[in-house]
Image: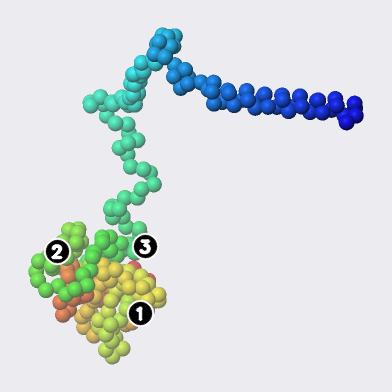
Amino acid sequence: MSTQEKPSLWKGYVLKAVIAALVVFAGYKVFVDKPSLEQLAPTQDELDSLSESIELIEEPEPVEETPAPEAKPEETPKPPADEAPPAAATEPPPNLVELVQPFVETGDDLLPELIEGYEGVSFDKLASFAYEVPLDPVTNKVELAKLNAQIPERIKLLDKKAVAIRGFMLPLKVENGLVTELLIMRDQSMCCFGTVPKINEWINIRMAGEGVQPIMDQPITLMGQLKVGEVLENDYLVGIYEMEGDKMIGPLDL
């Protein structure tokens, strides 16, 4: 072995010796000189000393909040009992129309107060009230009395009076070219337009004698004795006005 190889061998021996020493030292620490569990666990005195150094933090007691009083709505001051309400509260609105209006003749079919001894009456007066016509037969006096109560007293005062009425003719019965039975109506709505008039807008007239000349589409005036009251045929209401006709005159005769 040469002199150059001897130092390298010596270094190798030293390195191995160091490694072996480290292994032995580590084994001693792990298996021989390991700490016991008793040394790791703190003693009671140590725990007491530590507990004395801990300061307890007291939580503040919760403060109960007093709810704020509810605000009461302001009451509107009431007027004194003896104080009258404002006029605007008692008067009806101006755009309302009264359902029951006083009877006022328009003048369209006004007649003189007396015509040859007959009292002049217009359809404005005869048709100035509402009348509900029953659809069923009228079979007893109680129902008939209820119907008759719809006719105002001012109209009932014309019953059995000699009157003159102006209107339009609708012939019902013609004999030898003369009309012996007819309706005199307020206007020509039924003849020309097929509109059924109200029950107080016509009068059923039976002419005395041979009859009168048929005059259509022109207003005529008929005189006779007026009957006011319900007219029934086979227990059905067919009218409330009848007349025993005496004579007829045209509008040019007045």
| Circle number at residue 108 | 3
Query: SS of the residue at dot 1?
Result: loop
Pick whichever, 141 or 2, lies toward us: 2
Which one is closest to the eye, mark 1 or mark 2?
2
- How crowded is the residue under tag 2: few (<14 C-alpha within 10 Å), some, or many (20+)? few
Query: Where is residue 159 shown, x and y percent of the image?
Result: 16, 66
Name the amino acid, label 1. Answer: Ile
| Circle number at residue 36 | none
Q: CA distance from mark 1 to mark 2?
A: 37 Å
- Earlier along the polypeptide chain: callout 1 or callout 2? 2
| Circle number at residue 146 | 2
Residue at position x 24%, y 75% in the image: 204
- How crowded is the residue under tag 1: few (<14 C-alpha within 10 Å), some, or many (20+)? some
Q: Is residue 31 visible?
A: yes
95 up-or-down from 226: above or below: above
Query: SS of the residue at dot 2?
Result: helix
Query: Where is residue 140 shown, x and y percent of the image?
Result: 9, 71
223 up-or-down from 83: above or below: below
Q: Quadrant of the N terminus?
A: top right
* Residue that label 1 marks: 215
Q: Quadrant of the C terminus?
A: bottom left
Residue at position x 36%, y 43% in the image: 93
- How crowded is the residue under tag 3: few (<14 C-alpha within 10 Å), some, or many (20+)? few
Indicate left or right for 245 with 189 as reference: left
Q: Residue furthest front?
A: 1
Query: SS of the residue at dot 3?
Result: loop
Which one is closest to the eye, mark 3 or mark 2?
2
Residue 89, picture quadrant = top left
Pick whichever, 37 or 250, lies toward us: 37
Residue 119, picture quadrant = bottom left
